[in-house]
Amino acid sequence: MSELTARMKRRIKRRLGEERPTIWIGKNGASEESLREIEKQLEKKKMVKIKILKSALEGDEAKEIASRIAEQTEASLVGVRGHTFMLYKRRKK
């Protein structure tokens, strides 16, 4: 997992800023199914916007959940804003 530069983070945030989240994490948390879907979208588009529903938080911070998902999908966490976060993953060559 490579570190993103500030410039890359800004570019990704600008690109995904207006878009709606494509994946929602519900009360079941980050299930195998949702992790597979995140992987699939990262493979296709390199970046994905994810929304964590209040029912999924259960005392955890959105940042904690976001970094856990980033770790599991081997992606870089671009940013967390409220209950929404963005992931970026370079394509494998």
Image (cartoon, rainbow, N blue to C red):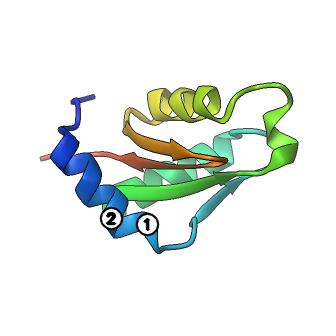
> Is 87 on the left or on the right of 57, as rendered?
left
- Residue type at mark 1? Gly
Relative image position of residue 11 (x, y in whole percent): 24, 59
Residue under pointer 1 = 17
- Please report the residue visible at 50 percent of the width from the left and 58 percent of the height from the top: 49
Q: Nearer the viewer, residue 68 or 34?
A: 68
Q: Residues within 10 Å of mark 1 (few under 14, many from 20)?
A: few
Relative image position of residue 20 (x, y in whole percent): 56, 72
Q: Is residue 59 above or below residue 87?
A: above
Q: Is residue 21 above or below residue 25?
A: below
> Would you say residue 28 is visible in this rendering?
no
- Residue type at mark 2? Arg
Q: Which mark is drawn over residue 88?
A: none
Relative image position of residue 5 (x, y in whole percent): 17, 38
Q: Nearer the viewer, residue 41 or 13?
A: 13
Question: Mark 1 and 2 residues: CB-CB less than 8 Å, in contact?
Answer: yes
Q: Nearer the viewer, residue 14 or 69?
A: 14
- Please report the residue visible at 30 percent of the width from the left and 57 percent of the height from the top: 12
Residue under pointer 2 = 14
- Label 1 sits on a secondary structure element that is helix
- Please report the residue visible at 56 percent of the width from the left and 35 percent of the height from the top: 66
